[in-house]
């Protein structure tokens, strides 16, 4: 497993441990303090443990080399994991909403706020670390997990405010804690749908950003003998992209000479662009290199 992917896997493991501790604290303290919002945020962190575990599994399998049955590698498994994380978040959000609306209990105690404050700080750190590691490894699952941590900051803040309102204004805002839990559920549902949308686009072989494709074309034409590019496509298979390139060369070259240029383009792109997993080069004649037939006067 490359060093970048090893780092991503370690970050996912750290996320599992942090979410497990926070889930236990928030759920336990929330029950003791009679805080629906704190318990709801604890349930959301418990879902994070499962999602981070799935992310780690996806990274491990996606890093496996290609084999006879999977010539393009196992990267798509990582994308499927990201899709599963999105569905899990949406389901967890729906469960949190239902729990919050069905619960009727006394006003929460003030000590319910300290695990929420701890969670906000921890998730802020984890979101930054996961986002950087996810972008470095081009991991859809880890990036989705980073966005999930970012939402945790928002949900933790909502829970914190809800508890404070219910504690300090019990006569007028007695249900603030319960409605805060419901709002947390809605936030989690929204995040789940966002992750599902992004991963679905990857499964549909959506092209990379135009800037990336332009860089690909420019780098390919740096190779001596590469005269033009007719077509260029790229699809993401997990952590990196597979590229299909129609390369134009001098039509007067032999098949072997054209083949060597194609091999040089493939090597150059894989060496220069770390987001390129493999390149399939199709050689075509460069039409401008073919002299036009003389016309009779």
Image (spheres, grey):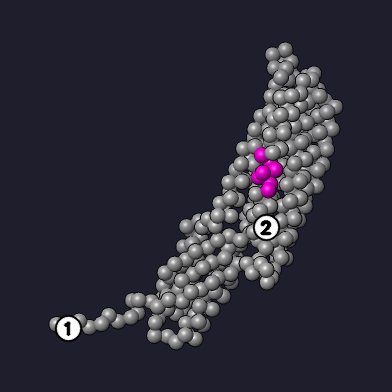
Estimate the x, y position of residue 233 in percent, counting from the top left: 49, 64
The magenta segment: 84-90
Give the mark nearest the N terminus, 1 or 2: 2
Residue at the image position 71 percent from the left and 65 percent from the top: 64
**Outermost residue to the left:** 297
User: Which quadrant holds residue 3?
Assistant: bottom right
Q: Main secondary structure of the magenta part?
A: helix
Residue at the image position 71 percent from the left and 56 percent from the top: 58
**In the rendered image, the vertical position of residue 154 relative to residue 240, given as above or below:** above
SS at badge 1: loop
Query: Does 228 sit left or right of 27 as displayed?
Result: left
Q: Which residue is mark 1?
A: 296
Residue at the image position 63 percent from the left and 40 percent from the top: 191
Q: Could you tell me how far apart the alpha carbons at marks 1 and 2 are, in whole angstroms? A: 62 Å
Q: Is residue 5 visible?
A: no
Per the image, is 85 magenta? yes
Q: Badge 1: how crowded within 10 Å, few (<14), some, or many (20+)?
A: few
Which residue is nearer to you in this view: 24 or 76?
76
Which residue is nearer to you in this view: 92 or 148?
92
Which residue is nearer to you in this view: 197 or 130?
197
Estimate the x, y position of residue 163 in percent, counting from the top left: 74, 25
Per the image, is 138 magenta? no
Q: Which residue is mark 2?
A: 77
Estimate the x, y position of residue 165 in percent, counting from the top left: 71, 21
Residue at the image position 74 percent from the left and 54 percent from the top: 56
**In the rendered image, the vertical position of residue 278 relative to residue 29, given as above or below:** below
Tally of numbered discs: 2
């Amino acid at each position: 497993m490359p060093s970048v992917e090893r780092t991503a896997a370690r970050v996912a493991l750290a996320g599992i441990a942090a979410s497990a501790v926070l889930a236990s604290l928030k759920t336990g303290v929330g029950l003791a303090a009679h805080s629906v919002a704190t318990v709801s945020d604890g349930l959301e962190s418990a879902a994070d443990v499962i999602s981070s575990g799935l992310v780690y599994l996806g990274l491990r399998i996606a890093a496996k080399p290609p084999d006879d049955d999977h010539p393009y590698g196992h990267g798509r498994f990582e994308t499927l994991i990201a899709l599963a994380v999105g569905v899990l978040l949406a389901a967890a959000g729906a469960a949190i909403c239902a729990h919050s609306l069905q619960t009727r209990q006394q006003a929460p105690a003030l000590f319910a706020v300290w695990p929420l404050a701890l969670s906000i700080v921890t998730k802020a750190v984890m979101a930054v670390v996961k986002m950087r590691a996810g972008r470095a490894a081009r991991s859809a699952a880890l990036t989705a997990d980073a966005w999930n941590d970012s939402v945790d900051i928002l949900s933790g803040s909502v829970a914190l405010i809800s508890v404070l309102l219910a504690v300090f204004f019990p006569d007028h805002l007695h249900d603030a804690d319960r409605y805060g839990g419901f709002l947390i559920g809605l936030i989690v549902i929204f995040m789940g749908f966002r992750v599902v949308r992004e991963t679905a686009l990857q499964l549909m072989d959506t092209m990379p950003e135009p800037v990336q494709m332009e860089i690909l074309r420019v780098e390919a034409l740096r190779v001596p003998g590469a005269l033009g590019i007719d077509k260029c496509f790229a699809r993401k298979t997990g952590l990196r992209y597979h590229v299909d390139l129609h390369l134009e060369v001098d039509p007067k070259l032999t098949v072997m000479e054209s083949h060597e240029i194609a091999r040089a383009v493939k090597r150059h792109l894989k060496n220069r662009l770390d987001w390129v997993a493999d390149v399939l080069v199709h050689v075509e004649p460069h039409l401008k290199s073919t002299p036009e037939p003389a016309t009779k006067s």
